[in-house]
Amino acid sequence: MTHLFYCSICYLLQFFRAWSGALQVSFYPQILQKTQKKGTMDPKNLLFSQPSLSRKGKLSNPVNNYESVTPEIYSCPDCGNEVELRSDERECSNCNAVINIINLRLGNERDNDSMRQEKNTESTLKELVQLSARLGASDAAVIFTNSISAEDDLANLCREPQCENYGLSASCPPHVSGPSAFRKLLNNYKHAIVIKIDVPSEILLSNQRSEIFRLLHGIVAAIEQSAVENGFSDSKAYAGGSCKKLFCHNHADCRVLAREGECRNPGLARPSMSGFGINVSKLMKAAGMSYGMITHELEETKISMGTVCGLVLIG
């Protein structure tokens, strides 16, 4: 019985060896073909590479020891010397500073992201300036917000001598935050767009001036909305003139102040620049624009063209 059992085991072992050999012969060409297509390994190395002893006495494979990392050139962050690197860290040959490739790559990625963002901002600002012209602005320009001056004395002119629109809308004093809060707000922005409309002085001194200021509010509101749609969600627009007189002159009260609901013209009405003490003369100078100031005290023959302007913070 024992002899029979031993013979059965030998027979099974022989059968298994024959079967595994046939399996390798039938499937190996397919595996080899896939490997050649991928180009990941030389078939000769796959077939004939043999283990060898490394310097530490451990078995190693020549195929696994193949140097697959190509050297890359980096500038040393300390001395600027160009260094050829193959591993994650290496010393600079000039100043012996340790250079971390991973940190350099992360820094390059951040620089690339910053460059892409700057290009996107530049492109958007250019489109907004072009949109201003299409909507009816005489001129528009991009400025840095650090050139915007918000002055307390100018804002106080709304109260003394009191402007005829003082306190009539939520966009005019004393219902706005004023120059101090506006100066703090500017710290959150880098760019702004200045818009102006040149108008004959006789129109600005007539009842037609309301139409010009309504156009101005419409332009800056459209620029603000376009900036928001392009990813600058915190953009804010300001314009000359009181929205109560321009858009709600047929209503007794401002709906917001009367607590009867939201603004009747949210797509057009924007806060008055005067209530924040924005110095229009300095604003025009920063934008490189000419500026004609018209008041009722001046004779229209002295200044032929006047200027109304608006401001949009982009951010």
Image (tube, rainbow, N blue to C red):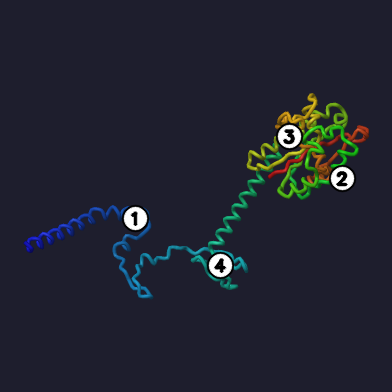
In the rendered structure, find residue 36 and report the number of the disc placed on it.
Answer: 1
- Whether label 4 touches label 1, CB < 8 Å: no
Residue 39 horizontal side relative to residue 168, left or right = left
Q: Nearer the viewer, residue 183 or 313?
A: 183
Give the percent coordinates (x, y) of residue 126: 69, 42
Task: Give the mark nearer the N terminus: 2 vs 1.
Answer: 1
Name the residue carrying label 4: 99
Disc 2 secondary structure class:
helix
The N terminus, quarter of image: bottom left
Tell which circle, 4 or 1, labels the residue nearer the N-terminal end.
1
Q: Residues within 10 Å of mark 1 (few under 14, many from 20)?
A: few
Real-space Cα distance between discs 4 and 2? Answer: 56 Å
- Residue 32, quarter of the rendered image: bottom left
Secondary structure under tag 1 reads helix
The residue beneath circle 3 is: 219
**x and y, in percent, of residue 10 in the image:** 12, 62
Numbered disc in front, either 2 or 1? 2
Front tag of 2 and 3:
2
Tag 4, which secondary structure?
strand
Q: Quadrant of the C terminus?
A: top right
Which is more N-terminal, label 2 or label 4? Answer: 4
Residue of label 2: 153
Q: Where in the figure is residue 13, as x and y percent of width and height?
A: 16, 60
The answer to which of marks 2 and 3 sits earlier in the sequence is 2
Which one is closest to the eye, mark 4 or mark 2? 2
Q: Is residue 160 above or below residue 47?
A: above
Q: Amino acid at mark 1?
A: Gln
Whether 100 is drawn above or below 202: the answer is below
Q: Nearer the viewer, residue 246 or 304?
A: 246
Q: Quick check: 165 left or right of 227?
A: right
- Quick one: SS at disc 3? helix
